[in-house]
Amino acid sequence: MADISIFYGSVYGNAQQLADDAKQQLVEAGHKAEVFEQPSIADFQQAEQLLFISSTTGQGDIPPNLEGFILELESRFPLLNGKGFAVVGLGDSSYGDTYCGAGRKIFSLMEELRGEALAPLFKVDACETLEPQEEVLPWLKQVFG
Ligand SMILES: Cc1cc2nc3c(=O)[nH]c(=O)nc-3n(C[C@H](O)[C@H](O)[C@H](O)COP(=O)(O)O)c2cc1C
């Protein structure tokens, strides 16, 4: 059983819904899980394992509800020291170079903070998938059990 803190970034609600669905599945599987909308550094430091689910907005940008937190992590740099993390990036490949830019930024930052990636960045392309749940929930099962 794991204790998983879920941090999401969402503009139109897809990633937010996904975070709620992920929590439900994880709890049903016997894990502890909590969803944070406006996380603090303390929430981050107290996390046992971390799951980020973030869409990309603007030109490869992190959604406003998560942006300040990510900037704070970049400036305060609280090390993860081997804690496990996973990142789901929601995006749209028609945006070209900025495809899943937020997910990629978050994944790199977690690596820089010395987290241990439990899996490679999982990208969901809105061009191809209308129901991100159908891809992400089975993937989460593989990553966290
Ligand atoms: C204004 C706007 C800008 C976007 N910019 C990007 C982008 O730069 N890269 C990308 O991969 N997706 C981009 N997207 C696609 C969203 O990330 C994608 O639709 C996602 O599923 C939205 O999730 P959300 O409802 O949680 O915000 C953009 C969407 C909008 C509406």
Image (cartoon, rainbow, N blue to C red):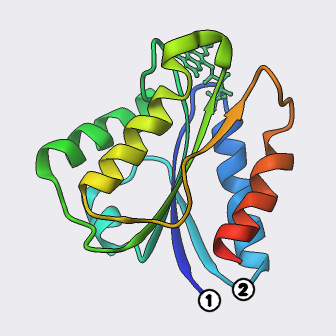
Residue marked by disc 1: 1
The spot of residue 87 in percent (x, y) is 53, 51
Q: Are marks 1 and 2 in contact (CB under 8 Å)?
A: yes
* Residue drawn at 23 percent across, 48 percent down: 73
Task: Please give the label number shown on residue 30.
Answer: 2
Q: Assign a secondary structure to mark 1.
A: loop
Q: Quadrant of the C terminus?
A: bottom right
Q: Quadrant of residue 82?
A: bottom left
User: Could you classify mark 2 by the number of other residues whose Cα lies within 10 Å: few (under 14), some (14-19), or many (20 or more)?
Assistant: few
Taking depth in this image into account, of 85 and 35 the one nearest to the observer is 85
* Residue drawn at 65 percent across, 82 percent down: 31
The spot of residue 97 in percent (x, y) is 50, 15
Report the number of discs. 2
Q: Assign a secondary structure to mark 2.
A: loop
Which three-letter amino acid code belongs to the residue tagged 2?
Answer: Gly
The spot of residue 81 in percent (x, y) is 25, 73
Which three-letter amino acid code belongs to the residue tagged 1?
Answer: Met
